[in-house]
Amino acid sequence: MSTTRLPRFERRAFVARTLAGPAVMLGATWALVALTRGHAPTAAEVWAAAGLSSAATLIVASLFVRETPYPRVSYVLSAFLLAGATLLTAAYPVDPSRWARATREIAWLFPWFFVSIHSGTPRMLGACTAAKARWLLPVSAALLALAIHLPFLLDR
């Protein structure tokens, strides 16, 4: 069994990205909670929180875009799908307090999705590069996007 070792600068860069991903996710989650908890949020605060969550998703995804084992198009499509899904929730004509309750619990998951898909070893992630798996990531992202919309769609 042969093991490949990353050069020192690549290991440091990987560790930095792996630490930066959760840091961005946690910062965005805390800001989202600060914007929408403890008072009745306004429509502007809902849009700001949705935009912040979408930006966090795109930032975390961009940290790993150069080294992802997934096809690049699938990866970028998934990032924009999840970011757009969060923004779209702010457009629902519901009470902003209800939006905060329904969305806050799941919006943190979108940036974390991109951190977690890179947590395996290169050998484990090798199957993701197969041609059959090119739609695995966008389908997973679409299911997550559906999960954030279900509370609004079922309430109609």
Image: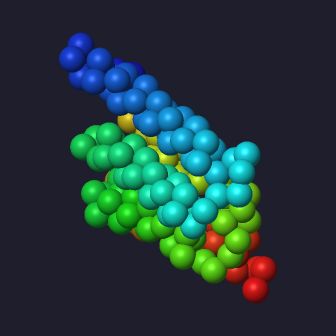
Furthest residue in direction bottom, as rendered: 156
- Residue 31 in percent (x, y) is at 54, 41
Q: Can you say whether 89 is above or below 103 in the image?
A: below
The residue lying at 38 percent from left, 35 percent from top is: 122
Task: Write down the quadrant of residue 9 in the picture.
Answer: top left
The residue lying at 24 percent from left, 13 percent from top is: 8
The residue lying at 59 percent from left, 48 percent from top is: 35
Report how many numbered discs are placed on residues in the image: 0
Residue 109 visible in the shown view: no
Its colouring scheme is rainbow
Task: Write down the quadrant of residue 72 in the picture.
Answer: bottom left
Left or right? Give the position of 16 relative to 120.
left
The residue lying at 56 percent from left, 61 percent from top is: 46
Q: Can you say whether 17 is above or below 86 in the image?
A: above
Task: Write down the quadrant of residue 123 in the picture.
Answer: top left
Query: Which one is nearer the viewer's eye here, 85 or 45?
Result: 45
Left or right? Give the position of 130 relative to 13.
right
| Quadrant location, the N terminus | top left
Residue 22 visible in the shown view: yes
Query: Which one is nearer the viewer's eye here, 130 or 6?
Result: 6
| Quadrant location, the C terminus | bottom right
- Residue 62 in percent (x, y) is at 31, 46
- Residue 102 in percent (x, y) is at 71, 62
Furthest residue in direction top, as rendered: 8
Q: Can you say whether 96 is above or below 7 in the image?
A: below
Query: Which one is nearer the viewer's eye here, 154 or 9?
Result: 154
Q: Can you say whether 117 is above or below 153 in the image?
A: above
Left or right? Give the position of 94 relative to 16.
right
